[in-house]
Image (cartoon, rainbow, N blue to C red):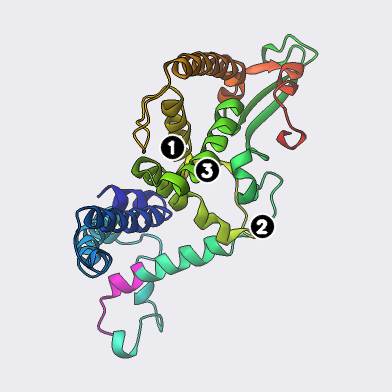
Amino acid sequence: MAFGLACSVKWSGLYFLAAFGVYSVVVDALARRRAGVSFWASAAILKQAPANLLLMVPIALVTYLISWTGWFVTRGGFYRNWADSLGAAWSGPLAWVPHTIQSFWHYQVAAYTYHVGLSTPHPYQANPLTWLFMIRPTSMYYVGTSRGEDGCASDSCSAAITSVGNPLIWWAATAALFYLVYRLARYREWRVGLIMMGMVAGYLPWLMYLNRTVFQFYTIAFEPYLLLCLTCVIGLVLGLIPHPRGAIPDPGRVVIGRRIVAVFLVISLLISVFFYPLWTGTQTSFTFWQLHTWMPSWR
């Protein structure tokens, strides 16, 4: 149901349905192997995979369709009567399909075709390969004023809203992501695998659309999992997550880890306070706004 609701908001939710569906089969296969089940791989693929498909996809599909109730039960919606127009309805073997369903399908295809082919240049477009490093945040709003205008007390003022996140948290989370990729390859921890599947579903599909006009704020789809990467590494530093090989954390390292995490959180909080005006459109001096352009590409 959650995956269906996600798809009803943005189609990229379908990638999460597929990714976690595959993840559930893989986890089941590994559980069968640990339990000593014969033919554990084939059993997971031939038995569990179809069962998971039936348990997940129909509910997600019905949930998605329910979200379109307003479109189905009314007239005059966008493409609602498309199949009723002359020569538009399907012919041949599919002619029996109700016009409402035909119109709905046409709407979905038209929306997909439009978005995949969207390649209009934009000054704040950001290549997906740069998202993890926050190279080109999106400027959502900017108003420049001079002294005396709208309460400006400096020679020039700025009021801006930008998609730049807390740089320390974002870059630390990206570093944590790369570390967890290594850790997953070495230890195959289920916690790390779960987080990685969220990143796979939310980020990797965008690499298929490198020529499409996209923006940094699209990362909102996988940002929760990126933050979970950071949370997981913090848990490892604090010794809160057990070692996959049963090793006991060194007490001295745990104490040092706590100090490092404390310093990290305090600095992150101070940076959040520093960037707060640029997240809320608060008027500041132009000089103060310039102090937030830590990279030339942030302008």
Q: Are marks 2 and 3 in contact (CB under 8 Å)?
A: no
Within 10 angstroms of label 2, few (less than 14), some, or many (20 or more) residues? few
Point out the frontmost of discs 2 and 1. Answer: 1
In the picture provided, is 90 more to the left or to the right than 276? left
Under tag 3, what secondary structure?
helix
Point out the frontmost of discs 2 and 3. Answer: 3
Position of residue 124 relative to residue 81, above or below, is: above
Q: Which residue is mark 1?
A: 224
Q: CA distance from mark 2 to mark 3?
A: 20 Å
Looking at the image, tell me whether mark 3 or mark 1 is earlier in sequence order. Answer: 3
Within 10 angstroms of label 3, few (less than 14), some, or many (20 or more) residues? some
On the image, which quarter does residue 72 sit in? bottom left
Is residue 130 or residue 160 the one in the foreground? 130
Q: Position of residue 284 (x, y in %)?
A: 68, 16
- Amino acid found under the numbered disc labelled 2: Thr
- Amino acid found under the numbered disc labelled 3: Thr
Is residue 132 or residue 276 the one in the foreground? 132
Q: Is residue 98 magenta?
A: yes
Q: Position of residue 110 (x, y in %)?
A: 47, 67
Residue sitting at x 76%, y 11%: 154
Q: Position of residue 163 (x, y in %)?
A: 59, 34
Is residue 225 or residue 188 the one in the foreground? 188
Q: Which residues are magenta?
A: 95-104
Count numbered badges in the picture.
3
Q: Which residue is mark 3?
A: 219
Position of residue 113 relative to residue 252, above or below, is: below
Q: CA distance from mark 3 to mark 1?
A: 9 Å
Q: Position of residue 18 (x, y in %)?
A: 36, 59
- Amino acid found under the numbered disc labelled 1: Pro
Q: Which residue is mark 2?
A: 120
In the picture provided, is 117 more to the left or to the right than 248? right
Residue sitting at x 44%, y 39%: 225
